[in-house]
Image (cartoon, helix red, strand yellow):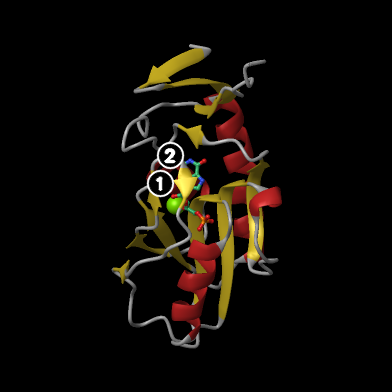
């Protein structure tokens, strides 16, 4: 399927599942090397990270723990920049090695907010693993961003956990909105 329609928008294929899996395998290998004998705590950011988290963890061979948090900041196809409450944040992360798992880093505001809350508990280390990154949208450099699957232009994407108005999370591949050519009038 090269093109799909979700509600009012047409999307075209951007990254096929095969490529996502290959890239995820490589990231997993790197994490296994970096975290040997450290028992990291993976914290997935719901809802978007659920598929990536599942596939990534299948590649992880070091002893580890898993948790999920939820933050809501997004509605429709434009980042609101407003970050709300963080739900499910573990309260026992003092001295732990944390790996935050994200579907996508856009402005980075959501992550900055999460990081600020995490650091209050003085973890041993915090790194971020995001499947996707829109470098041009990033508001400030994020030094914790250690593992990135793919860098994207500032297109809106859906599939493989990512949604448009709640739809499309179940798609195997990642799609982007087709560029809208302005009319000559
Ligand atoms: P910020 O701007 O805070 O946004 O880095 C991070 C969160 O916003 C969502 N997001 C998207 N969701 N397609 C989506 O389905 C996109 O292109 C997109 N860009 C940002 C996502 O939940 C991310 O964690
Ligand atoms: Mg997310």
The vertical placement of 132 against 119, above or below, is: above
Q: Quadrant of residue 65?
A: bottom left
Rendered location of residue 78, percent (x, y)? 48, 45
Residue occupying the point 59% across, 35% down: 155
Q: Quadrant of residue 34?
A: bottom right
Measured in 3D between alpha carbons, the distance from the residue under mark 2 to the one under mark 1, in whole angstroms, is 5 Å
Give the answer, above or below, for where 159 lies relative to 141: above
Cβ of disc 2 within 8 Å of ligand 1?
yes
Which disc number belongs to residue 162?
A: 2
Give neighbour class at mark 1: few <14, some 14-19, many 20+ (Cα, 10 Å). Answer: many
Residue 63: % across, % down: 46, 64
Residue found at x 57% / y 62%: 128
103 or 12: nearer the viewer = 12
Count of all numbered marks drawn on residues in the image:
2
Give me the disc on residue 48: 1
Given residues 179 and 147, the one toward you in this image is: 179
Pick whichever, 158 or 29, lies toward us. Answer: 158
Going by the image, does 83 lie left or right of 30? Answer: left
Residue contact at pointers 2 and 1, CB within 8 angstroms: yes
Above or below residue 129? Residue 162 is above
Q: Position of residue 39 (x, y in %)?
A: 49, 70
Q: Is mark 1 within 8 Å of ligand 2?
A: yes
Query: In the rendered structure, which disc, 2 or 1, sits on the residue that comes first in sequence?
Result: 1
Q: In which quadrant of the rendered image does the C terminus lie?
A: top right
Query: What SS does tag 1 mark?
Result: loop
Considering depth in this image, is 5 or 80 the residue closer to the camera?
A: 80
Residue under the image location 52 percent in, 34 percent down: 157
Q: Tell me the element at label 2.
A: loop
Position in image of residue 105 (x %, y %): 56, 53
* Residue 43 shown left or right of residue 97 in the figure: left
10 Å neighbourhood of mark 2: few (<14), some, or many (≥20)?
A: many
């Amino acid at each position: 399927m090269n093109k799909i329609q979700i509600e009012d928008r047409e999307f075209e294929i951007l990254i096929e599942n095969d490529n996502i899996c290959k890239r995820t395998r490589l990231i997993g290998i790197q994490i296994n090397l970096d975290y040997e004998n450290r028992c990291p705590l993976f914290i997935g950011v719901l809802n978007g990270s659920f598929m990536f988290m599942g596939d990534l963890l299948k590649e992880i061979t070091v002893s580890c723990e898993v948790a999920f948090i939820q933050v809501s900041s997004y509605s429709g196809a434009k980042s609101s920049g407003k970050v709300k409450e963080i739900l499910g944040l573990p309260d026992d992360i003092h001295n732990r090695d944390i790996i935050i798992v994200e579907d996508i880093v856009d402005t980075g505001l959501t992550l900055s907010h999460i990081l600020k809350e995490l650091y209050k508990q003085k973890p041993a280390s915090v790194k971020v693993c995001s499947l996707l990154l829109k470098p041009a949208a990033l508001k400030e450099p994020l030094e914790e961003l250690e593992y990135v699957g793919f860098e994207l232009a500032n297109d809106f994407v859906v599939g493989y956990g990512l949604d448009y108005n709640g739809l499309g999370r179940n798609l195997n591949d990642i799609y982007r909105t087709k560029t809208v050519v302005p009319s000559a009038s």
